[in-house]
Amino acid sequence: MTRDLPWPLTAYFAANNRHDIDAMLAVFSPDAKVRDEGETYSGSAAIRAWMEATTRKYRVTVEVADAALNGDAWRVAGIVSGNFPGSPATLHYNFTLAGDRIEKLEIGA
């Protein structure tokens, strides 16, 4: 399914599965926002800190199960496995793109 995703999303999930923080961050715009677990992270420094903390804590990998496009927003269902209760679980990743960069990411059930 990832072959149907635009490059920034394919690159994000591939880097996430390698736990490569630099590559994950590279596809975000400098002023991007991420919302995860009830918190919002704005800008590259905050997003990097979130990526480092969640990667260290959960060590997740994501298998893309489904994806849908609505305008410039992508909703991706991912089967997420890692060090957390209930693993694996299906989470939804809601991406907004600006050109070839991720402008916004919201992660939830």
Image: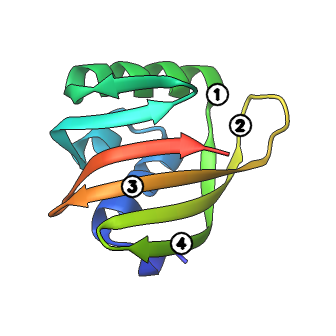
For the C terminus, which image quadrant?
Answer: top right
- Residue indicated by mark 2: 82
Q: Earlier in the sequence, mark 2 or mark 3?
A: 2
- The answer to which quarter of the image holds residue 86 is top right
- Residue indicated by mark 3: 95
- Residue indicated by mark 1: 58
- The answer to which quarter of the image holds residue 51 is top left
Q: Earlier in the sequence, mark 2 or mark 4?
A: 4
- Residue indicated by mark 4: 67
| Residue 75 placement (x, y as % from top left) | 50, 63
Q: Distance between the residues labelled 1 and 3?
A: 21 Å
Q: Residue extending furthest right?
A: 86
* Mark 3: few/some/many CA within 10 Å (<14, 14-19, 20+): many
For the N terminus, which image quadrant?
Answer: bottom right
Q: How far apart are marks 1 and 2 (CA)?
A: 5 Å
| Residue 24 placement (x, y as % from top left) | 34, 43
Residue 36, can we see it?
A: yes
User: Which color scheme did the rendering employ for the protein?
Assistant: rainbow
Q: How far apart are marks 4 and 3 (CA)?
A: 11 Å
Q: Which amino acid type corresponds to the residue marked 2 in the rendered image?
A: Gly
